[in-house]
């Protein structure tokens, strides 16, 4: 939780606490179960500051709560802990649960009110979602395949030259795909600092840090955003993140718009949208600018996180790596690198992609929803205006659906004969829920599958060794926040053979 200088904000804080107490006193006895709170502050001290999804999962497992309720400073919060509850609420009643709460830290101070993921339900949201969804539907994703292949090849070359920098290479690959697909702009060569990568990394850091509702007290008491910056560290943090956010949403757009005017722009999502917009329609241009910024800023996050998880999983599970490589070798015979049309012939690889998303989801506690009207679920009253938090971690670690859920086991998604098992739920929750599912899912899945297949076809990923030759076990630690990344760890990445090394070097134009 964020801390600020209390004295200058005392009047505002006391007024907020008084209002919270009045709301708390009217709380229904038929609200979902949850830990008992204190007068005025409610469950403020029950909200975990680190890995809240684990604490909420513990509540679900220990007390059998499909949904749980807490009240923090008058804000009613509902936590959804099972796949069944998520289906019943977000899919079957999507009209009630598709809104977003207003989050002063994210929306106002960091300046991300244009980001589709945090935009409230309404006409603006529908316009943005329609545009982003259209550009990322299954057929449009095919358009991006040459770009995905190009930057994956560069990732392989970068890793061959400098395997110790693999996590930096992942960021370059992911940002390269998102930037070129959206704007037809290339990031700098490997080893050269790139302003766009720096901007998007900082913007994503802001999203990851502030994106869980209630991380900062200003989410509960919006008036705190008026406290002077010199007395509130959270405002100084927001100011720094906003600089990068402003770069990410304005600079590449303005560069492309200038190139279009000069007749020198290369084809991209943006140029296509600018050609289709209404003549002189400023509102259309604003929607296009904001939607493209969402595609760019969010486009790299899932890839970097999931690929980091993939490398960790391969280090920790050499038998999985060996089985995947055997499947790839049986198809390619070491004569070429994978193609997109190979995907259907690689069921075990596809299972690895799913298991990476399930085992350590990118967004363990999903973007917050807001309930627009009173609702009833399993005889519990869910009040209008409540913040609804889907606990994706709990959903994807349900031991009934996914036995032994903390073990990395791709075979859980396959039948005994190695084909896709329709009885096992695909980890789609990793991309959000119902009307708020990430519209970039198709491109993300295509990029991940291609990158994992290409990496396994050419490299062995094993544990690093210390000075005495002893293997170093990765800690398996992850960052905390809305977006979750494995912390960098030492590992050994080496070409599988001279033939594989030659394939890597011959397949890229660098």
Image: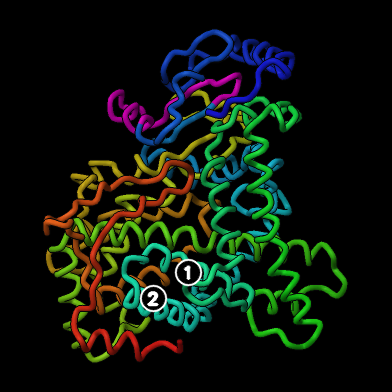
Q: Nearer the viewer, residue 464 or 54?
A: 464
Residue matched to label 1? 172
Instruction: Tell me: 233 left or right of 34.
Output: right
Residue 267, image x, y percentages: 64, 84
Q: Is residue 25 a member of the stretch shown in magenta?
A: no
Q: Is residue 192 above or below residue 34?
A: below
Q: Is residue 95 above or below residue 219?
A: below
Residue 467, image x, y percentages: 16, 57
Q: Secondary structure at mark 2?
A: helix
Q: Is residue 106 above or below residue 421?
A: above
Q: Nearer the viewer, residue 92 or 400?
A: 400
Instruction: Tell me: 100 left or right of 309.
Output: right
Residue 243, image x, y percentages: 68, 52
Quadrant in the picture for residue 327: bottom left
Give me the residue at 68% from left, 79% from top.
272
Give me the residue at 57% from left, 68% from top.
194
Q: Secondary structure at mark 1?
A: helix
Residue 495, image x, y percentages: 23, 78
Q: Earlier in the sequence, mark 2 or mark 1?
A: 2
Residue matched to label 2? 158
Residue 18 appears anywhere in the view: yes
Distance of label 2 from label 1 (alpha carbons): 10 Å
Q: Are marks 2 and 1 in contact (CB under 8 Å)?
A: yes
Q: Residues within 10 Å of mark 2 (few under 14, many from 20)?
A: many
Give me the residue at 19% from left, 67% from top.
321
Quadrant in the picture for residue 281: bottom right
Q: Which residues are magenta?
A: 55-76
């Amino acid at each position: 939780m964020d801390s600020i200088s209390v004295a200058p904000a005392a009047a505002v804080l006391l007024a907020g606490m008084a209002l919270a107490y009045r709301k708390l006193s009217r709380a229904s006895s038929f609200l979902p179960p949850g830990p008992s709170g204190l007068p005025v502050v409610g469950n403020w001290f029950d909200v975990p500051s680190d890995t809240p999804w684990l604490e909420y999962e513990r509540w679900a497992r220990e007390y059998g709560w499909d949904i749980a309720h807490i009240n923090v400073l008058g804000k009613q919060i509902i936590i959804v802990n099972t796949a069944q509850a998520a289906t019943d609420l977000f899919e079957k009643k999507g009209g009630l649960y598709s809104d977003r709460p207003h989050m002063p830290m994210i929306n106002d101070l960091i300046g991300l009110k244009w980001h589709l993921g945090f935009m409230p339900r309404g006409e603006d949201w529908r316009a943005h979602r329609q545009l982003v969804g259209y550009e990322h539907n299954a057929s449009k994703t095919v358009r991006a395949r040459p770009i995905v292949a190009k930057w994956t090849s560069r990732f392989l070359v970068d890793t061959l030259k400098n395997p110790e920098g693999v996590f930096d290479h992942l960021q370059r690959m992911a940002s390269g795909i998102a930037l070129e697909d959206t704007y037809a702009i290339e990031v700098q060569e490997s080893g050269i600092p790139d302003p766009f990568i720096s901007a998007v990394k900082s913007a994503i850091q802001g999203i990851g840090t502030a994106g869980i509702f209630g991380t900062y007290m200003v989410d509960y008491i919006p008036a705190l955003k008026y406290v002077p910056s010199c007395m509130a560290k959270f405002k100084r943090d927001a100011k720094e993140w906003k600089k990068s956010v402003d770069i990410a949403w304005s600079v590449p757009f303005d560069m492309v718009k200038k190139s279009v005017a000069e007749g020198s722009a290369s084809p991209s999502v943006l140029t296509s949208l600018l050609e289709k917009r209404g003549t002189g329609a400023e509102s259309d241009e604003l929607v296009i600018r904001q939607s493209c910024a969402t595609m760019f800023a969010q486009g790299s996050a899932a890839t970097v996180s999931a690929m980091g998880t993939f490398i960790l999983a391969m280090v920790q599970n050499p038998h999985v790596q060996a089985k995947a490589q055997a499947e790839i070798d049986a198809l390619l015979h070491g004569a070429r690198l994978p193609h997109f049309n190979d995907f259907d012939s690689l069921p075990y690889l596809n299972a690895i992609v799913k298991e990476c998303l399930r085992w350590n989801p990118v967004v363990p506690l999903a973007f917050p929803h807001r309930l627009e009207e009173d609702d009833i679920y399993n005889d519990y009253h869910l009040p209008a205006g409540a913040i609804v938090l889907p606990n994706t971690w709990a959903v994807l670690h349900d031991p009934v659906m996914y036995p032994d859920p903390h073990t990395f086991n791709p075979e859980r998604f396959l039948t005994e004969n190695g084909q896709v098992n329709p009885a096992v739920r695909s980890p789609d929750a990793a991309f959000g829920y119902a009307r708020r599912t990430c519209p970039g899912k198709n491109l993300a899945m295509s990029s991940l599958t291609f990158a994992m297949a290409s990496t396994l076809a050419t490299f062995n990923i094993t544990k690093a060794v210390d000075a005495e030759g002893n293997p170093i076990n990765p800690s398996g630690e992850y960052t905390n926040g809305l977006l979750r990344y494995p912390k960098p760890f030492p590992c050994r990445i080496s070409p599988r053979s001279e033939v594989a090394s030659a394939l890597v070097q011959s397949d890229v134009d660098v």
